[in-house]
Amino acid sequence: MHTKTKAPDPTYTPNWLERMDSRTALAQQLRDRYHRMTSDLGGEAHLSYMQRSLVTRALHLEYFLELEELKLRETPDKFDSGKWTQANNALGGLLNKLGLERQSREVSLDAFVKARK
């Protein structure tokens, strides 16, 4: 049994997003980002396993970059520009593989109405 966490592990681990305690604001925000990103790609149901895997890795890198940027603002002496640059380049590569253009998907009127409730 996996214990729930309040934040992602500093290093990427499989299923990190699912292990986060969904009662926390951070988990809710990251899950919202996951759903927005998969929606931009045409919907989670239309994505392959590898595409979903790349999405979670991209989210983890995005979170890491935000933490590093907070360090730059709050404790500049602890900011590692080399790590930030590597992570930023890696994130760019993942996003390029996923595609930076939004993908349209067909939605029935019934599904649209249900989603709005």
Image (cartoon, helix red, strand yellow):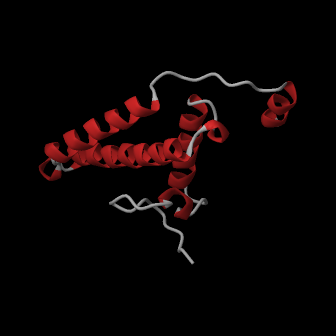
Residue drawn 62% across the image and 30% down it: 42
**Residue 6, image x, y percentages:** 48, 63
Is 14 on the left-hand or right-hand side of 64? right
From the viewer's side, name the closer residue of 9 and 74.
9
Q: Position of residue 37 (x, y in %)?
A: 53, 35
Report x, y in % for residue 116.
Answer: 79, 33
Q: Residue furthest left?
A: 77
Q: Residue at x 53, y 41 (%)?
A: 33
Which of the 4 quarters of the picture holds residue 38?
A: top right
Task: Tell me if residue 70 comes above or below residue 14 in the rendering.
Answer: above
Residue 45 is left or right of residue 56, and the answer is right
The one nearer the camera, 44 or 75, is 44
Q: Which residue is painted at 82% across and 32% down in the image? A: 111
Q: Quadrant of the image for the N terminus?
A: bottom right
Name the residue located 38 percent from the left edge and 43 percent from the top edge: 62
Residue extending farthest right: 110
Query: How many marks overall?
Result: 0
- Residue sitting farthest toward the bottom: 1
On the rendered image, what quadrant is the C terminus found in? top right
Q: Nearer the viewer, residue 113 or 68?
A: 113
Above or below for 88 versus 57: above
In the displayed structure image, the side of residue 112 where residue 60 appears, left or right: left
Q: In the rendered image, which quarter is residue 104 located in? A: top right
Residue 112: x and y, percent?
A: 80, 29
